[in-house]
Image (cartoon, rainbow, N blue to C red):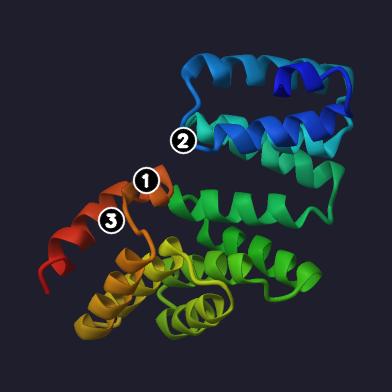
Amino acid sequence: LCVQAWGVVAPEQAALTCVDLLRSGRASQDDFARVRERVESSVADNPESAELVFQLANIRHLQGDYAAAEELYRRTIELAPASVLAYNELAMLLVLLDKNQDEALELIDRAIERAGPLAFLLDTRGVVYLSLGRDEEARRDLEDAIADAPTPAKYFHLAQVHLAMSDRPAASTAYRQGIAVGLHADALHPLEHSQFEQIHAGLGQF
């Protein structure tokens, strides 16, 4: 149905829908290849479309081609300086790659200035603060994010912060709250899987 819709609706809408389907976890490599080919073709035809470039960045991100994803997120921001989602994705990617935490903080702060303290943005900034050793600020952001929209990833990030603050009981509570709402490795970014396994081993029996 998505393939059939490609020539009927705007390419940006088709790309968004297809990428959402790729995120489902049930897409095959052939599915990824087909969607990527169509989006790349649409970008070639519409190189100034920030939405198409952004969705291509998301595809490369999902495929684990982080260098290409970073470049495309930066291109999205050039085309659409108010693209909150691109700022957020690039900030999280940079901090998880341990590339440039200071730039990541600048990016996520820009996103929050534009959109306000939305839960998913506070989650990203909490991860950035944690990487910078600003644990108390990370804790506040993550607790605010969870109060607004609790998710497995946010509880995992809060557990990480409590461990960084040497508060093992609080870390265990956050971890177990995450498990209760579906926390597992696949609920996190692939770059966080090794961290999850470490925390699971350390807190799973606590």
Q: Position of residue 116 (x, y in %)?
A: 74, 74
Closer mark to the observer between disc 2 and disc 3 = 2
User: 99 or 168, which lies in front?
Assistant: 168
Residue 58 visible in the picture = no
Specify whether residue 131 is in view. Answer: yes
Where residue 178 sits, quadrant-wise, is: bottom left
**For the residues marked 2 and 1, what is the alpha-carbon distance in whole angstroms?**
9 Å
Q: Amino acid at mark 1?
A: Asp
- SS at mark 2? loop
The residue indicated by pointer 1 is 186
Q: Is label 2 in contact with label 1 (beta carbons under 8 Å)?
A: yes
* Quadrant holding the N terminus: top right
- Pointer 2 or 3: first along the chain: 2
Dot 1 alpha-carbon crowd within 10 angstroms: few under 14, some 14 to 19, many 20 or more: few
Residue located 70% across and 49% down the image: 86
Please, which residue is most extreme toward the front here? 1
- Crowding near pointer 3: few (<14 within 10 Å), some, many (20+)? many
Q: Earlier in the sequence, mark 2 or mark 1?
A: 2
Q: Secondary structure at mark 1?
A: helix
Q: Amino acid at mark 3?
A: Phe
Picture residue at 53% right of the left edge, 50% below the top: 94
Q: CA distance from mark 1 to mark 3?
A: 10 Å
State whether residue 66 is above or below residue 128. Answer: above
In-front residue for pair 1/114? 1
Q: Label 2 belongs to which residue? A: 25
- Left or right? Give the position of 39 relative to 138: right
| Residue annotated with mark 3 | 196
Which of 153 and 125 lies nearest the eye of the viewer? 153
Position in image of residue 57 (x %, y %): 65, 35
Name the quarter where the C terminus is drawn: bottom left
Quarter location, residue 68: top right
Q: Amino acid at mark 2?
A: Gly
